[in-house]
Image (tube, rainbow, N blue to C red):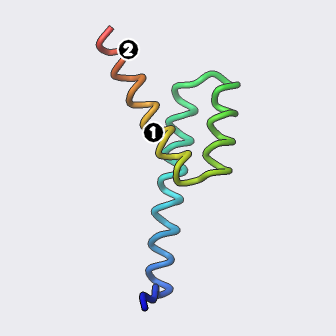
Amino acid sequence: MLFITSFGVTVIVGLLLILIITALVLAAKSESNLRFLIWGAIILFVPFLGAIACIINYYASKNKVKSA
């Protein structure tokens, strides 16, 4: 069986926190207040998928504005 040590759990939780904080900062930079509240709720209720979706949305919209 696969056992995860306390160090492994600490690393995983640390990386998840970094991902969530990064997504919240990027959402706060680029969105209006209502959209930030929506993204914040998504990120906090579905942490991993919400954070990844927010980061992808940020960079996709940034590239869309740059190419226009």
Q: Which mark is residue 55?
A: 1
- The image shows residue 20, relative to residue 11, as above or below, that is above
Q: Residue at x 50, y 78 (%)?
A: 9
Ranked by sequence position, the earlier of labels 2 and 1 is 1
Identify the residue at horizontal 57%, vertical 24% (top origin): 31
Residue 22 horizontal/vertical position (percent)? 49, 46
User: Residue lying furthest front in this view?
Assistant: 1
Which quarter of the figure is the C terminus placed in?
A: top left
Q: Residue at x 68, y 33 (%)?
A: 38
Three-letter code, disc 1: Ile
Q: Position of residue 60 (x, y in %)?
A: 39, 27
- Whether 42 is drawn above or below 58: the answer is below
| Quadrant in the picture for residue 67 | top left
Name the residue that disc number 2 marks. Answer: 65
CA–CA distance in space, label 2 to label 1: 16 Å
Q: Camera-side residue: 57 or 19?
A: 57
Specify whether 21 is left or right of 7. right
In the picture, the quarter occupied by the N terminus is bottom left
Name the residue furthest left. Answer: 67
Q: How many marks?
A: 2
Where disc 1 sits, the SS reads helix
Which amino acid, by three-letter code, is at mark 2?
Answer: Val
